[in-house]
Amino acid sequence: MTIGLVPTARERVRAEITAEITDAARRQLAEVGAAALSLRAVAREVGMVSSAVYRYFPSRDELLTRLIIDGYDALGAAAETADDPGAPPRERWLAVCRAVRAWALAHPHEYALLYGSPVPGYSAPRDTVPAASRVGIVLGRILGDAARAGTLPTAAGERDPALISDDAVAILGGEHPALDETVRVRALMAWSALFGTLSFELFGHFVGSVEDGDRYFDRVTTDLAVLIGF
Amino acid sequence: MTIGLVPTARERVRAEITAEITDAARRQLAEVGAAALSLRAVAREVGMVSSAVYRYFPSRDELLTRLIIDGYDALGAAAETADDPGAPPRERWLAVCRAVRAWALAHPHEYALLYGSPVPGYSAPRDTVPAASRVGIVLGRILGDAARAGTLPTAAGERDPALISDDAVAILGGEHPALDETVRVRALMAWSALFGTLSFELFGHFVGSVEDGDRYFDRVTTDLAVLIGF
DNA sequence: CCGTTGACGAGAGCGGTGCTCTCGTTCGAG
DNA sequence: CTCGAACGAGAGCACCGCTCTCGTCAACGG
């Protein structure tokens, strides 16, 4: 077994088959959702017997974890490309929100896998954290740039590390300049409110209350921008 | 078959067994979650064979629907008893929020069933609507009382029925006095933000960002109260 | 009062699932 | 060239949702 650099033919075909399996799994996910995703059906689609798939993924949950990471990455990439660092903070925030919503509407089952109920005995593995942080990092960068531009209030009171951790602070604007904690908490709140709105829309909790999802979403994200201070 | 009033012995024992099944199912739900809830295991727990359960519930999804409705009712009842109509609006809002969170923390799997990814696809959302509306009605009553007390801005611009439907308006304060649409939209937003925060907390999206969930939640709900105008 | 009917529980069975194990084959590193 | 590791196939286990049949037994109508 070679370590990196030049992959052997065996490693190459292994990577290819792994990709084939994840692609088939992603198609299954988009069609029937995570709960009904069957490893056997995936195996059938790639022309394998179910036991052969276990050479590539030790369990169905590991396969789902792969899809989760890929989903976070796709969503993070969508958020990143939607963010124009030259635009004013509010426009950047709105653009990122719209991009996140567009991705969620285009991939409802993947969104449900990421932000819906966790699957049965599933414990969020550490591997998903970096990918999951990407969209938060985009928001944090907007916040930091706005702070550097001096349009946000700087630290007034003391920080409370129990309320919002050092890691989260590092993402949400960092330490320079010293943002007021209130702003960071509101940014975190806007973040979860964004996904709360999306979850309600996608999971049908707005049925009968909101007709025009596009305009409602714009209103909400605009209100959230004002709340943050953008 | 008698129609209501005096139930026959047969109807009584049927209702008893149905309750036994739902109780066992609720225990299973609390233990292993909705995705892993097995009708056969429920049957075992009540000392039946699996096929016998189908005399009472036509499918596993119908059993889940029963649990969903019961869950919405339990949550709604918790919100209703937490609301003291004599208290000022902000205190009422905070109390209801805390009650909702307390219920969610005490029944995480039930909460996931209600507000996580819809598990059976789109089985029977129609029957669930009245129960699901209860907690929203509580919030709407607070909003209406506050409006009657004259502490909220009255209608300034035109209403936009596509943004927020007539049904939702009827719940969120009604037509007298004519609340400004902005306030109603913000209330709706606060409602989804509340559940967005809870979902993030329960589904682990705050891990590494928020240490003290209690205080963070109070901060968020307080901010939301200010946003609404309470 | 008795016969019919319908509800009921048990059991077998079908097709599906995740996962394990064993068995030939094949391929590539030493 | 050899030998071990990786691989795919297949059988099999335990479980799942759900259907069907069958014997029983209680309630209702004539």
Image (spheres, coloured by chain):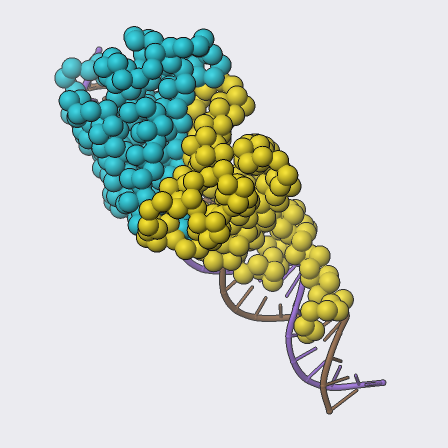
Chain colours: A cyan, B yellow, C purple, D brown
Rendered position, C27 above or below B150:
above
Residue B202 image point, x, y percent: 49, 31
Residue A222 image point, x, y percent: 30, 34
* Left or right side of B94 for D8: left
Viewer-nearest residue: A137 or A193: A193
- Please report the residue visible at 28 percent of the width from the left and 39 percent of the height from the top: A218
Viewer-nearest residue: B97 or A99: B97
Viewer-nearest residue: B182 or B101: B182
- Please report the residue visible at 41 percent of the width from the left and 18 percent of the height from the top: A182
- Residue A76 visible in this rendered orientation of the protein: no
Viewer-nearest residue: A41 or D8: A41
- Please report the residue visible at 54 percent of the width from the left and 23 percent of the height from the top: B214
Residue A199 image point, x, y percent: 38, 40
- Residue B146 visible in this rendered orientation of the protein: yes
Q: Quadrant of residue C4?
A: bottom right
Rendered position, B89 above or below A179:
below
**Quadrant assignment for the C terminus of chain A:** top left
Residue A27 image point, x, y percent: 27, 44
Give the tally of numbered discs: 0
